[in-house]
Image (spheres, grey):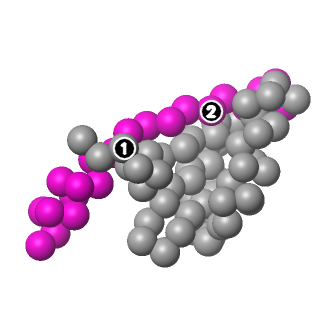
């Protein structure tokens, strides 16, 4: 089991939609509520994550899901 940043997907849920953040080989990626992908710095990810975790925005929920990147990478070869 690999426990590095690229092993997790961060999901920020609103009342109507979900934003996803994950790490690939080049850095962080944000998937918007419309499904568009954007590159993000670690600071940008934290800027979106911290208000949700602090409770300042009460209708946001944060979930983190584990994904086994190692077996995905091995199956691609």
Residue 31 higher or lower than 19, as above or below: below
The secondary structure type at the circle numbered 2 is strand
Q: Mark 1 packing: few (<14 Cα in 10 Å), some, or many (20+)?
A: few
Residue drawn where x is 70% and y is 36% of the image:
14
Label 2, label 1: how far apart the Cα atoms are: 19 Å
Residue that mark 2 sits on? 62
Q: Is residue 76 left or right of residue 28?
A: left
The secondary structure type at the circle numbered 1 is loop
Residue that mark 1 sits on? 3
**x then y, percent, for residue 25:** 42, 71
**x then y, percent, for residue 43:** 73, 59
Residue range in magenta is 57-77
Say which of 3 and 76 sits in front: 3
State yes or no: discs 2 and 1 in contact (Cβ < 8 Å).
Answer: no
Which quadrant would the N terminus be assigned to in this image?
top left
Q: Is residue 10 left or right of residue 41?
A: left
Q: Is residue 74 left or right of residue 50?
A: left
Q: Is residue 16 visible?
A: no
**x then y, percent, for residue 12:** 64, 40
Write down the quadrant of residue 16 in the picture. Answer: top right
Write down the quadrant of residue 74 in the picture. Answer: bottom left
Q: Is residue 20 visible?
A: yes
Label 2 vs label 1, nearer the camera: 1
Which quadrant would the C terminus be assigned to in this image?
bottom left
Q: Which comes before the other along the chain, label 2 or label 1?
A: 1
Residue 9 higher or lower than 25, as above or below: above
**x then y, percent, for residue 40:** 65, 67
Q: Mark 2 packing: few (<14 Cα in 10 Å), some, or many (20+)?
A: some
Marker disc for residue 48: none
Residue drawn where x is 38% and y is 39% of the image:
66
Residue drawn where x is 23% and y is 55% of the image:
70
Residue drawn where x is 76% and y is 39% of the image:
50
């Amino acid at each position: 089991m690999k426990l590095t940043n690229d092993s997790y997907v961060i999901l920020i849920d609103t009342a109507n939609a979900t934003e996803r953040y994950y790490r690939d080989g080049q850095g962080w990626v944000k998937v918007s509520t419309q499904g568009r992908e954007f590159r993000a710095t670690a600071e940008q990810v934290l800027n979106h994550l911290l208000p949700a975790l602090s409770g300042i925005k009460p209708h946001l929920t944060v979930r983190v899901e584990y994904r086994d990147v190692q077996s995905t990478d091995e199956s691609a070869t």
